[in-house]
Amino acid sequence: MTGDGVNDAPALKRATVGVAVAGATEAARAAADIALLAPGLSTIVTALILSRQIFRRVETYIIYRIACSTLYLLFFFLALWAFKFEFPSWILVVLGMLNDISQIVTGYDRVVSDKYPKRWSMVEVSVKAFTMGIVATGGNLLFVWLSAQSGGEMDLNLEEDHQSFWSAWGLRDLSDAELVASVYLNMSINVQLMFFACRTKELFWFP
């Protein structure tokens, strides 16, 4: 509903979105949800585009936050329970800092406005976030299992004759410190790339 006079104030108040055009009275501006300062209605289109961009930024942030939290919680719990892999706590702090830095860019992400209005769906957000978090967790656990070797100082819960896949390529096995460093590097890369997965709405090879 658009209006500019005192007689339009009740309709502007009851409308889903009330818009007071440029030069409207104080009563109309007070009752409206949006007050236009420049002549014309093109500002309404701009407001719709910006609001849909903000919606996508908030949705991306929530998906990314849930996915990263799922990755951290599941990986550290399952790695300790399945392999007795004790990850240094200070590395968890560093990963958390990298996660926070990555979240800053969500407010400045150049998203594309949706063509149609979009409704909030917590089920859709949860499915996307937990799926990415669980897949990333499985990948990191598989990396630990493939990279670790039995008989190391960390005494991982592995078979006695377990060999890492590094030896299959003719390379030397990783030491315990190198294993921790490689897992940290793998998780940090997962955290950074997960943001792109959260903001992508289609298959990545489509424009």
Image (tube, rainbow, N blue to C red):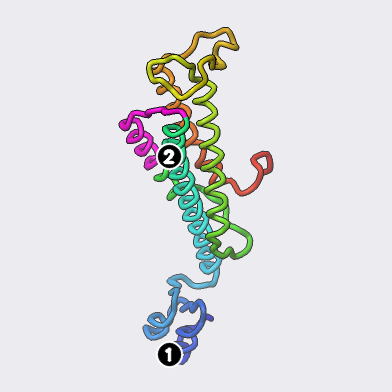
Residue 172 in the image: state x and y as whole percent. 50, 8
Packing grade of label 2 (10 A; few <14, some 14-19, many >=20) is some
Magenta span: helix, strand or loop, mainly? helix
Q: Nearer the viewer, residue 73 or 65?
A: 73
Residue 124: which quarter of the image?
Answer: bottom right
How many labels were placed on the picture? Answer: 2
Q: In which quadrant is the C terminus drawn?
A: top right
Q: What is the x, y in percent for residue 105?
A: 43, 44
The local crowd at label 1, few if under 14, some if 14 to 19, many if 20 or more residues have their Cα within 10 Å, is: some
Query: 27 or 146, which is in the foreground?
Result: 146
Q: Whole-percent x and y of residue 122?
A: 53, 60
Going from N to C along the chain, the mark reached first, 2 or 1, is: 1
Determine the residue positioned at 60% across, 12% down. Answer: 168
- Residue 144 within the magenta-colored segment of the rendering: no
Q: Nearer the viewer, residue 195 or 114?
A: 195
> In the rendered image, which residue does mark 2 sit on?
72
**In the image, which residues are magenta?**
83-101
Label at residue 6 = 1
Circles 2 and 1 in contact, beta carbons < 8 Å: no
- Give the secondary structure at mark 2: helix
Q: Is residue 92 magenta?
A: yes
Q: Residue 186's mark?
A: none
At a point 50% along the width and 62% down the height, the residue shown is 51
Q: Distance between the residues labelled 2 and 1?
A: 57 Å
| Kind of residue sitting beneath label 2 | Tyr
